[in-house]
Every structure is written in C-alpha cells, then in structure tokens.
Amino acid sequence: MNSVWIILAAIVSFGTTALLGKWMVPFLHKINFGQTIREVGPKWHQKKNGTPTMGGFMFIIGIALSTVIFVPIYYSMTKQDSLQMMMRTKIFGGLLMAVGFGAVGFFDDYIKVVKKRNLGLNAKQKLILQFIVAGAYLYSLYLAGSSSTTLIPFFGNVDFGIWYWIVALLGIVGMVNAVNFTDGIDGLNASVTFFVSLFFMLISGILGIESMSVFAAALAGGCLGFLVWNINPAKVFMGDTGSLFLGGMVCALGFGLNLPILILVIGFVYICEILSVVIQVVYFKATHGKRLFRMSPIHHHFEMCGWNEHKICRVFSLVTVIFGVAAFLLVFYGF
C-alpha cells in the first residue's frame, strides 16, 4: 500500500511538469526569455540561439507540489500523524535548499536574458550565495539534532567531528555545480538525474525510509515530465534555475538518507563533468595553451568527437545506471 504514494508522487510530478510546458514554453517565447549560446561552444549549437530558458520552473513547481502533498499523506496513511523533526527537516529543508539554489540560478539566468549574453552572476557572487544556501540547510539539520556521524558501507556509523560539517558544506556546493556542468546537451541533465533519483528511491526503500522514496519519486517524475519538452531538439532549456535546483535535490536525497557518500557513486557522471573542467583548466595553464579534451565539460568533448546528442544522453544514462547498481549493492551488502 505504501508504494501507492510513491507512484502517485511520481505521476503528479510528471503530469504537472509536462502540462506546465503547454503554457510556459509559449510564455517564455512571448517575453523573449531566450538562451544566448556561447560563441566558444560547438558551432552547430548556434541554431539553438533563442530557445526559451528558465524552463526549470516547470519541474520545480511539479516536484514541490508533489512533495508537499504526498509526503504528509504518506505519514498520515501509515498512522504516523506527525513527522519527526529530523525527517521533516531532511525532506522539507532539503526541498527549500534546492529551491534556494534554484533562486541563485534564476538570478543568473535573468541577468543573462536581460543582457542578451551568456554571462550572468560572476563566479564569486555565485559561490557566496551557494555557500549561504548550503550553510543554512546544514545549520537546520544541526538544529534538528543531526550529528557529525554518517553511514559508511562496511564501516557503519563514523563520526568525523567538526570536519563533517566543513566537508559537507564544500561537498554540497561542489556537487551542485557539478550537476550544473552536466547541463549543455538537450535532455542530458534531466536524463541522468532521472536515473539518479530512481536509485535513491530504491535505496530508500531497502533502508525502510519510504518517505525519502516519495521525495525521490517526485524528483524522478519531474525530470521525466521535463524531458517531454527538453529531449533533442529541445523546445526549452532548464537554465541554471533548473540545473542548480536539481543539484540541491540530489544533495538533499543523499544527506536525507545520512549517506552523502552515495552521491559520489550514483552521481559519477556529475563528478566526471566537473573534474573534466578542472583538469582542462589546470592542463591548459600548465602547458601554456594545450588542451587535454577537445572541449569541456566532457559531454562537449564527445560531441566534438562526432557523437550526437541522443548518443551522449544514452551513454551517460547507462553509466549512471551502472554506478547506481554499484551503489545499490554497496548498501545491500554493506549494512
């Protein structure tokens, strides 16, 4: 019976997101909120110039609506009349953190659209705002009674002391930006995050934390609903509004299960994306102008090698599935 609420959460999130596209895509066209494509990117991306951006609002609304409806219903129907403070904070505090990151992305997108160039907030401004959002979330966990202990497969509970909060803060901001870098190919970010959320949903189930399964199902449904409009050729882009929100959701799921280490495994594609950027910059400076990749993030490298956008989405999604299975086995055999 509990699985009904998981399924309904996914369906409502999917339906809301997909249906919102019927109104939002024409509306974004009407107000000229189109993406300005970078001149340094692949030349064939120039044909995407003017495609509406900030479409992330579609799944932000869908996911938030589904969460605030079905998480309380789940607890009510399972005769848990009130959420424990910690779980309430993990779910709704995690959702607010994701919305906060989405707000940072919105400011960035808005500046890009108004100035008609592919530059928004500068790096320093983004990082300051992101650290504030991540810090507020972690502080809310601390106030709710969260400790510096986290679960490590095969080792059990490990207390990292003050370092837990420091690494968590850096890790959240880093992962959110890693998810942001995964955006840039039609359907890529939503496809990868769809499978990431599916595995978090399954892992939540085997750990008996079904409220997190409902939360993950809402994310999965929102990603799938957005793909209706974002699969190549994309009719709308999620923008930083959407990609930073997705990054916040992924972190909220990992910390919600007290297994943030799983983010590194299930989110292997995200890690590769941000590392490819870091490696490219370091290599470029060290060799005085040479490039290790044809273009970074790494999805553009494969694109420059001749892979079409559909193939990149399929391969990156398959890699996510493989590492998702690895994470599932870690949890299944590690506890």
Image: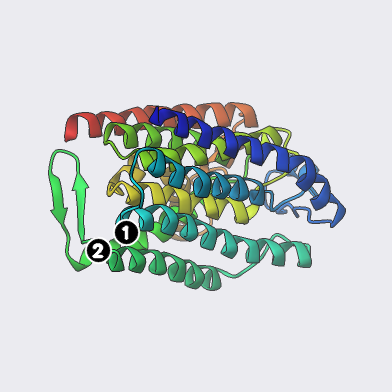
Residue on which the image places disc 2: 145
Dot 1: few (<14), some (14–19), or many (≥20) neighbours within 10 Å? few
Residue flagged by tag 2: what amino acid is it?
Gly
Q: Which residue occupies 67% across, 64% down?
A: 119
Q: How is the image coloured?
A: rainbow
For this rendering, which residue is in front, 331 or 125?
331
Taking the spot 51% from the left edge, 37% from the top edge, the residue there is 9
Left-right relation of 128 to 115: left
Res 225 → quadrant = top right
Could you tell me how far apart the alpha carbons at marks 2 and 1 are, in whole angstroms? 8 Å
Q: Work out whether residue 128 can be spotted.
A: yes
Mark 1 — residue? 85
The x, y position of residue 252, in whole percent, is: 40, 52
- Please state, as top left, top right, bottom left or bottom right, where the N terminus lies in the image: top left
Helix or strand or loop: what does disc 2 sit on?
loop
Q: Is residue 137 above or below residue 307?
A: below
Left or right, 279 with reference to 28: left
The reply to whether callout 2 and callout 1 are in contact (CB within 8 Å) is yes
Return the x and y of residue 70 as percentages of the image width and height.
Answer: 49, 42
